[in-house]
Image (cartoon, helix red, strand yellow):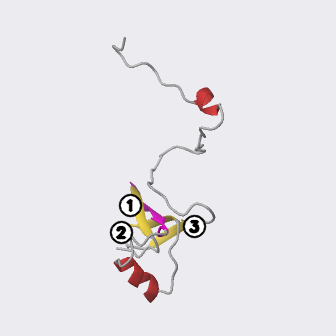
Amino acid sequence: MAFCPGYLRGMAFHGHYAIVGLSKQRGSSTLSGLALDDGLRERDADPRCGLHIIDLRTGDVVHWLRIEGVIEELYDVVVMPGVRRPTAIGFVTDEIRRVISVAPEEGAT
């Protein structure tokens, strides 16, 4: 439907859009020899890490987000309707104890 310059890892749908995660190739040759290699060569493109938003009605990439630096792989994509300011909570500090709570399961003893 659409060419994406990276290895697709994760996909979510919102309305008539698909949000796909792109990853760069790992250092090993595990993913070499795939059709993506030919597509990148034909388009003189480098693999990217990031997100592509694809309009499912047309196949057009209507928006993209490129992630550069130490992050080279994404593993999944999730759409969170109605969320305005998502936050990532780390495991190193004590903030995880202050922010996340789990209610006891009904009937648990």
Residue shown at 50% from the left, 61% from the top: 73
- Which of 16 and 91 lies nearest the eye of the viewer? 91
Using the image, determine if residue 91 lies above or below residue 66: above
Residue 25 vertical placement versus 73 (above, below): below
Read off the magenta span: 13-26
Q: Which residue is mark 3?
A: 66
Q: Which residue is mark 1?
A: 16
Q: Nearer the viewer, residue 95 or 80?
A: 95
| Residue linked to disc 2 | 57
Amino acid type, label 1: His
Q: Nearer the viewer, residue 5 or 28?
A: 28
Q: Quadrant of the N terminus?
A: bottom left
- Name the one closer to the observer, 20 or 93: 93
- Element at badge 3? strand
The reply to whether residue 16 is in sight is yes
Of marks 3 and 1, the one in the foreground: 3
Say whether residue 18 is visible: no
Decide: few, some or many residues near mark 2? Use Cα within 10 Å; few <14, some 14-19, many ≥20: few
Give the amino acid type for the residue marked by disc 2 in the picture.
Arg
Do the CB atoms of the residues marked 2 and 1 lie less than 8 Å apart? yes
Would you identify the image quadrant in which residue 76 lies? Answer: bottom left
SS label for mark 2: loop
In space, the residues marked 3 and 1 are separated at their CA atoms by 22 Å
Mark count: 3
**Viewer-nearest of discs 2 and 3:** 3
Could you tell me how far apart the alpha carbons at marks 2 and 3 are, in whole angstroms? 23 Å
- The reply, left or right, for residue 87 in relation to residue 56 is right
The first of marks 2 and 3 along the sequence is 2
